[in-house]
Structures are given as C-alpha cells and as structure tokens.
C-alpha cells in the first residue's frame, strides 16, 4: 500500500492548546496516521503519513477550523510508513528561535515563489538588478546532504543559534537581496523577519522551502544534492524520490 506523506505548518494564534492537542491526536489515531504534530501559541507544525484517503480526510477536518482554512500541505509518497509512531505535543514554539518578539503569526515577511527564485538564479540577479544571496537556515548536518550553490552556511548546530549568527554577519549581507531557505519554509519565515529587524530591507523567505522548490522546479537551477527530511527516508532528491534508493515515489 502506498503511503502519503504530508508536511505543513501555519503561524496563527492558538489559545486552546490542550483541547486542540487531544482532538487532533484522537482523530489521527482513529485514521491510522503516524508522525508528529507540534502545537504552540504561535501555530501548528506537522509531519504525518498514512493511507492517502485517511490523510486527506484528516487534513479536511483540520481545515474546517477557520484558523487552518486553506492550509497548504506538501505531499510525497512512499511504499512504507516512514514514522514509527504518532506524537502530538504542545511546545513553547513550533520552531524554536528563543526570540519572542519575532511573531510570524502577526504578519509574514515577504516571500519569493520557487519559479521566481529559479529565474533570479538563472539570470544572476533579482528583477531590480541586485545580487541574490541564498542563506541556509538549517543545521549544519542537514546541509551536508545538499544545498543551493554558493549558499551561505553559518554552521548552525540548532536554529536558535541563528540570531547570534545574524548579528555577527549582518554587515556582509547589506545591499543584497537575501533569500533565506530551509526544508519546508518554517525556519526561514522567522529568519526573514529577524533579518528585516536587523536592517536588511531586501530580505525574503523561499515560499514552501526546498521541498516546494523541488516540486515546482525539480531543483533547477541552483540546487545540488538532496534534502534531509526528519523521518526514515532520510533525504529526498529534487524529483521527490528518496536519495538512497528507499521506497519513496513521486505522486
């Protein structure tokens, strides 16, 4: 049986966390889903897998809540369940930065669509003629699997190291169009906001992260290698196939 894998997130104010956790966990268990759902006052972050009808039904139920209406989910397929169990947890942040003043749920930073970024990279500059710099916000071990060519890598051990790294290197980014990116978009949402606060007005997030770039461009131009994912598939190629011959097949 083919297994549908979905990842999604949304920064949105949430107040009823225990009740929401219990409901989403019960519904996911009933549907036979596995993976992780993280909840915090700032929003939701999820990675789930299971039978396609069950995954789509669970997402449809989630979207009935007005806070999650229209929630976008990135999809890929596998021949086996890549998660060992289901976890639904309440956290202080759905992606930890330790900068409470950075609140994407109150307003997003500007984003650039994958097809637009591909054009910028192909032409060597943005539409206003500025140099485009790719800034990887992932952890160092993830970047070893693959990254955008000539992307800046600050050798982060964890995402909460990003603010200090930005403070140390912000001057190197002045006057350039900086596109922050990560696996699925959640880290670069916060990173782009912090860059704007640091006085870098031409700061963007890559909409949907590397996985959306793979989906819409198959990694060309500019990406080399695979993308690490936090499940048993380990990493995906630009065609959304497992990089090491595992069981993933593109939809």
Image (tube, rainbow, N blue to C red):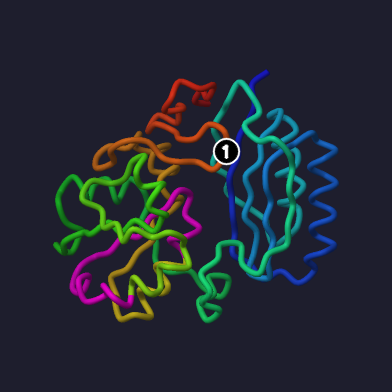
Q: Quadrant of residue 57?
A: top right
Q: Which residue was labeled with disc 1?
A: 231
| Residue 202 or residue 159, whichever sits in front | 159
- Residue 176 falls within the magenta-colored stretch: yes
| Residue 159: % across, % down | 46, 62
| Residue under the image location 41 percent in, 55 percent down | 138
Count of marks, rendered view:
1
| Residue 2 or residue 125, whichever sits in front | 2
- Residue 184 falls within the magenta-colored stretch: yes
| Residue 2: % across, % down | 64, 21
User: Going by the image, does 86 lie left or right of 116?
Assistant: right
Q: Residues within 10 Å of mark 1 (few under 14, many from 20)?
A: few
What range is drawn magenta here? 167-189
| Residue 77 or residue 71, whichever sits in front | 77
| Residue under the image location 60 percent in, 40 percent down | 6
| Residue under the image location 32 percent in, 68 percent down | 203
Please tell me whether residue 142 is drawn above or below residue 131 in the rendered image: above
| Element carrying mark 1 | loop
Please tell me whether residue 198 is drawn above or below residue 91 in the rendered image: below
Quadrant of the frame with the N terminus: top right
| Residue 113: % across, % down | 37, 52
Please tell me whether residue 16 is drawn above or below residue 147 in the rendered image: below
User: Going by the image, does 126 lie left or right of 38?
Assistant: left
| Residue under the image location 43 percent in, 50 percent down | 209
| Residue 8: % across, % down | 59, 49
């Amino acid at each position: 049986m083919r297994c549908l894998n979905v990842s999604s997130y949304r920064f949105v104010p949430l107040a009823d966390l225990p009740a929401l956790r219990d409901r989403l966990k019960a519904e996911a268990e009933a549907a036979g889903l596995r993976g992780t759902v993280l909840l915090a006052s700032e929003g939701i972050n999820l990675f789930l897998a299971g039978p396609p009808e069950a995954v789509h039904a669970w997402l449809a139920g989630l979207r009935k809540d007005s806070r999650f209406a229209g929630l976008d989910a990135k999809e890929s397929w596998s021949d086996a369940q890549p998660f060992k169990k289901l976890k639904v947890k309440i956290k202080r942040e759905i992606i930890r930065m330790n900068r409470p003043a950075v609140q994407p749920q109150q307003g997003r930073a500007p984003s650039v669509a994958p097809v637009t970024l591909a054009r910028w990279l192909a032409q060597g500059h943005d539409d206003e003629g500025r140099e485009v710099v790719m800034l990887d916000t992932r952890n160092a071990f993830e970047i070893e699997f693959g990254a955008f060519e000539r992307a800046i890598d600050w050798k982060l051990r964890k995402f909460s190291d990003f603010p200090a790294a930005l403070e140390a290197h912000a001057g190197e980014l002045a006057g350039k169009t900086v596109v922050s990116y990560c696996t699925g978009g959640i880290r670069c949402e916060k990173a782009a906001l912090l860059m704007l606060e640091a006085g870098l007005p031409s700061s963007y997030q890559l909409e949907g992260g590397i996985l959306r770039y793979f989906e819409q461009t198959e990694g060309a131009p500019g990406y080399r290698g695979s993308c690490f994912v936090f499940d048993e598939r380990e990493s995906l190629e630009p065609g959304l196939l497992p990089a090491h011959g595992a069981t993933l097949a593109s939809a």
